[in-house]
Amino acid sequence: MAVDRTPVLKRCRSLELDPIVLGINKKSNRQPRRQRRNESEYGRQLREKQKAKFIYGVLEKQFRGYYDEAKRIEGITGDNLMTILESRIDNVVFRLGFARTRKEARQTVRHGHITVNGKRVDIPSYRVKAGDVVAVANKAKDLLPIKEALISSEHVAVPGWLEVDIEKLQGSVLQLPSRDQIDLISDETIDPQLIVELYSK
């Protein structure tokens, strides 16, 4: 399986992303780059796609599949794409505060430490549905990474489309997220319309 081994902070700099978006509370000591001059429309569109792929940890083939699915669903394609990405189980585990980063959440899922409706799920791309209950498996509740994640996420707000019960180490999917419930959709982070324009060419 292909893996992006580019250092995270270096990649954040090149995409002009704040590492906190990834759950990483670090700042680079290097000087910021000078503002790009005359960036083409294609360049802006490509950068938005690269940011979305990097944040959610998705490679090109899978990302293109998500776009094709989003295009078939009724509604705005860009918003549909972001909803699909947000509904991945690794992202949900991160959003509930059971992992410090999406990368750590993927590893937690792969190791079989997460259940959905009482059944173990070990595929990070598994997609949750409204009404699903996502929980830390009983055998994993005392694992140090999960305990550390819970401590570091105490001051992080859980999005409105999710509900978490920290004592039981479980969360509920109240609904799939709408555009205004996805904090990554903004001019500073991800503009999904530019991704749609890129793939529409």
Image (cartoon, rainbow, N blue to C red):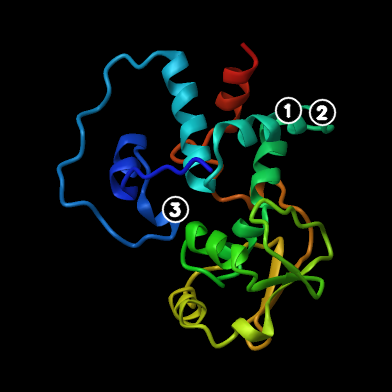
Viewer can see residue 34: yes
Q: Is residue 111 left or right of residue 39?
A: right
Which quadrant is the C terminus positioned in?
top right
Query: Does residue 102 lie above or below 197 as drawn?
Result: below
Helix, strand or loop under label 3: helix
Q: Depth-wise, is mark 3 or mark 2 nearer the camera?
A: 2
Question: Residue 122's quadrant in the figure?
Answer: bottom right
Sort mark 2 into few (<14), some (14-19) or many (20+) by Cα contacts within 10 Å: few
**Hey, what amino acid is under mark 3?**
Val
The residue drawn where x is 46% and y is 44% is 3
Within-10-Å neighbours for mark 1: few <14, some 14–19, many 20+: some
Residue 158 seen: no
Q: Which residue is mark 2?
A: 72
Q: Which residue is mark 1?
A: 68
Q: Amino acid at mark 1?
A: Asp
Q: CA distance from mark 3 to mark 1?
A: 26 Å
Front residue of this view, candidates 138 and 83: 138
Q: Residue at x 66, y 32 (%)?
A: 78
The residue lying furthest to the front in this view is 1
Are circles 2 and 1 on residues that touch, CB within 8 Å?
yes
Residue under circle 3? 21
Amino acid type, residue under disc 2 in the picture: Arg
Q: Is 169 located above or below residue 198 in the figure?
A: below
Q: Is residue 76 left or right of residue 146?
A: right
Between disc 3 and disc 2, whose residue precedes?
3
Q: Residue 80 at what x, y percent from top left?
A: 72, 37
Q: CA distance from mark 3 to mark 2?
A: 29 Å
- Find residue 106 and report its horizontal and vertical position in percent: 56, 59
Residue depicted at 43% across the width and 75% down the height: 152
